Image (cartoon, helix red, strand yellow):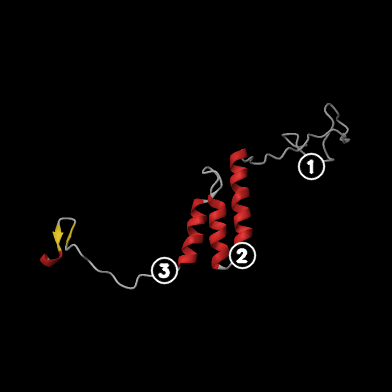
Amino acid sequence: SDILGWLPKGNKKSVGSNTGSTSASTFPTTKKKKKFSEEGAKRQGVLNLLALLKARYTTNEAKIQLAIMFSFISPSLQPKDQITSLLGEIDNASITSIEISNTTIGGYSLSDA
């Protein structure tokens, strides 16, 4: 006999029975699922929608429209990082040159080096 009284479903012994017969009563299994808050579920829905639309509409004009559309969502749900990413994809900028106009950086002069 099991010390804790736990046996697989269908093999649960009846309480007070020494015959080893099985009882139809078993403990119900409860699965604890992590519940999202309502706000978290809404935010995840917004992120899912943006991901689907971003995969479907890939032109630069479409990305601009997606960024504009998702910027109208309330600030607490607005996917700011994803909007920034969309705009970065559209810009596709690169640095071609750097010109240092101030030769003193952090109290040190570049001419002293």
What is the three-letter code of the residue carrying label 3? Ala
First in sequence, mark 2 or 1: give its number.
1
Callout 3: few (<14), some (14-19), or many (20+) C-alpha neighbours within 10 Å? few
What is the three-letter code of the residue carrying label 2? Tyr
What is the three-letter code of the residue carrying label 1? Pro
In front: label 1 or label 3 = 3
Residue at label 3?
A: 93
Give the percent coordinates (x, y) of residue 110.
15, 65
Q: CA distance from mark 3 to mark 2?
A: 21 Å
Q: Where 11 falls versus 18 (above or below)?
A: below
Circles 3 and 2: CB atoms closer than 8 Å? no
Q: Secondary structure at mark 1?
A: loop
First in sequence, mark 3 or 2: give its number.
2
Q: Which mark is residue 57?
A: 2
First in sequence, mark 1 or 3: give its number.
1
Give the percent coordinates (x, y) of residue 35.
64, 40
Circles 2 and 1: CB atoms closer than 8 Å? no
The quadrant holding residue 51 is bottom right
Q: Where 93 falls versus 104 (above or below)?
A: below
Residue at label 1?
A: 8
Give the percent coordinates (x, y) of residue 103.
16, 63
The quadrant holding residue 31 is top right
Give 8 or 70, whichever is nearer the viewer: 70
Circles 1 and 3: CB atoms closer than 8 Å? no
For this view, does 5 lie left or right of residue 90? right
